Image (spheres, rainbow, N blue to C red):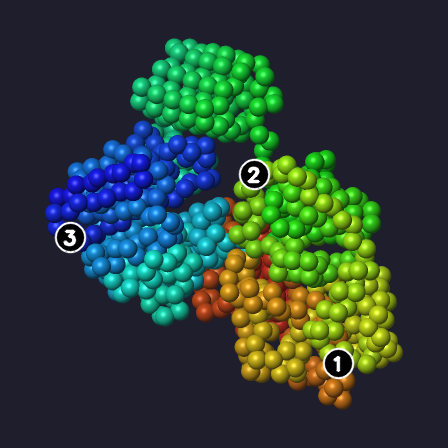
Amino acid sequence: MTTIIINYSRRVLYMVQAEKTMFDSIILAGGFGKRLSPLTDTTPKPMLPIANESALSRNLKLLRHCGFSKTAITAMYLPEKLKGIDNDQGVTEFFYEESPLGSAGAVGQFKDRAEDCIIVMSGDAICNFDLKKAKEEFLQSNCDGGILLSRTKDMGEYGSVCVHDGKITELCEKPSARDTLSDLVNTGIYFFNKKALSLIPENQFFDFAKDLFPEMLRRGMPIAGIEPLGMWFDIGSFGDYHKCNLWMSKGESCIGNHVSIHPSAKIDCAVVFDNCTIGDSILRGCIVAENVVIGNDCLIPSGCVIGAFAELMDGTVLSPGSIVQPKETIKSKSFADWFPKPKQQLVLDDDCIIAEDNDEGYFVRLGRLLGGNGTVVAFAEGSGVTLQQACELACGAAKTGSSCTVISGGNAALAAFAAKEYDSKTAFIYKSGDKTQIRLFSENGMPFSREQLRVLSAKTPTDSKITGSVYLLPHGVLIKKYLAHIRKNCNLPRSITFISSGENRFSREIAEELGILQDGKLKFGITPDGEKAFAVLQDGKEIPYWQLLAICCIESGRDEIVLPRDTPDMVERILNRNSVKTKFYGDSDSEERKSAAGEFLHRDGIILALTAAELAEKKGVDLAALAEKIPPFSVMTRAIYADRDNMYSVIAKLREEHFGNRTAGFDFGYGRVSVYPSASGRFRLVAEAVDAETAEEISLKAIDLLDKSK
């Protein structure tokens, strides 16, 4: 028997035990639940009601029903609110974290008190899985860990998982569309043996998805992928929380205890907490926290969230998606100015944000999101509309107190350089057809990671009392710094020529400033974004970007290079055969991505072209002779529309059928087509073969196979 003593004043939980207990289950209930604010301002997320019973209570009952009776619960945020939990539901102890230890770090406290097989559950998700059967499957797998999986059409905020023969082969936490591995997601329900738990360090922040599971895979410790039957809901967003309630109530409104409702009130698909008073009003598809008072003739439409102890007086009408803060009072007929504006909705493609050109305040709001700490560079492609938009963005960032610099004239590669040079978040604004697009670069010159974009999308900007400065940087100042950067990072050839198309004018100017002769014997072209280069030989034949990059890596004697995950397989094989080790990075934060910040060869076309020309001069041969040392191949990229409902299931099927490849796709024996899902609802196909005609042929075959898989 265990007695639980809670010291509320210090928010620390103490336990007095008759005997030392060995646990068979752990529930993680220490999260802050920030995405569910204001509901979680007064109630920890595991205690939010799901059809009038807390998520924590439901999970404890599920554990008890499935034979797990000795449960530890980790708590940190509002631990005194974890009420209504008693030993009849299998609780043995609560443990309070004074500082966040991460999901695995919290469990690490129990390494010496865990049974040989222990289940770990998130306290803020709901399922009806048969956990007893799942445990049996885990034990039969002879694995050191196990992850319960569920399938979804929308990856959202979940961890993506790749499985082969019942074993986890790869994980990616909250991936971008491009990095998504399959339609299988991590439910946050795990099994571990003691060997796996022994990897968790003492008193150190450690996460399951980002730390423990990758370490287990590196050590060759097998992790079972278990896909049980049943429903699973993560309640991390308002939409998912609302959907979970309606599922549990079979589509009916969920009304809490001690709620007073006017007989004429109309309530449809709403979630109402305890102790609320609702007058003759209309509530549809909304969430109302505890102790809220809603008067007569009010309209609370879909997507609205009302914080605890708020009061909506007679005649209040809310716009869909409005948020009312706890204890806020809304007076009749003055609703128009009371609610915060919706958060900036970022329309994402794989490499950019698509701007809303018809929204006059768009760039100011985006600037306010980027500002707040550190400095911001607003980089315009040209001097027209994009420069005006860059100035608007800078003014928005300045409102938050950030110091801002506006630069005009250049490309994405130069913007990435500016980000690193000025140690600033940088927004590169450019036109693509009739659309304005924005690429964001972090202070290290790399594109914003998936994690940075998630934080940006969820951010609520706060203006500073002191407005920051806005400085217009002369273009020549940046160019001087860029020239110094080139001299530092590559050896310069005696001569080089850039082709005469308008988009290469900048490259020719750089060559002139560097004092390099332009004699016309070997020509290079730079792509409009400035990030890639290709060579044009005297006979008119081209050496495309990927071959040029491979030549430079091999001939310069490099030992290793870090490349994007969508690098063609042929490039990897050629480099590996020539003793160049390859590592790859995706859109998520990783050590490989950090290392790539110091790589310029594959991200700056001018540096790549100068390096290739210098290597040919140094070896006393023309570039064609160096190109003959590597097998010929051609890479072709195209995009096709995909069915969003089965886009990720197609990727899962391709990975399983062609297991062993770095990417999902089709192998044709005489070429390969890699398939990447896109945030815009398309598949991007990268075909690679011995020549362009064959690459075209297999890309069409891949399209036909994808059509048949629908």
Q: CA distance from mark 3 to mark 2?
A: 46 Å
Q: Which residue is mark 3?
A: 20
Quadrant location, the N terminus:
top left
Left/right placement of residue 478 relative to residue 454 reads right
Placement of 454 over or under 513, stated as above or below: above
- Near mark 3 (Cα within 10 A), the count class, few <14, some 14-19 or many ≥20, is few
Picture coordinates of residue 602 (x, y %)? 65, 69
Q: Return the mark for residue 136.
A: none
Image spot of residue 538 (x, y percent): 82, 79
What SS does tag 2 mark? loop
Which badge, 2 or 1, comes first in the chain's sequence? 2
Residue 640 visible somewhere in the drawing? no
Report, in whole angstroms, how far the alpha carbon at label 2 lies from the one at label 1. Answer: 49 Å
Crowding at dot 2, Cα within 10 Å, few <14 / some 14-19 / many 20+, comes out as some
The residue sitting at 56% across, 76% down in the picture is 560
C-beta proximity under 8 Å, tags 1 and 3: no
Q: Is residue 27 left or right of residue 680?
A: left
Task: Decide which of tag 1 and tag 3 comes sooner along the chain.
Answer: 3
Q: Which mark is residue 614?
A: 1
Depth check, mark 2 against mark 1: the one in front is 2
Give residue 685's quadrant in the image.
bottom right
Q: Nearer the viewer, residue 268 or 642?
A: 268
For label 2, the residue is 460
Element type at marker 1? helix
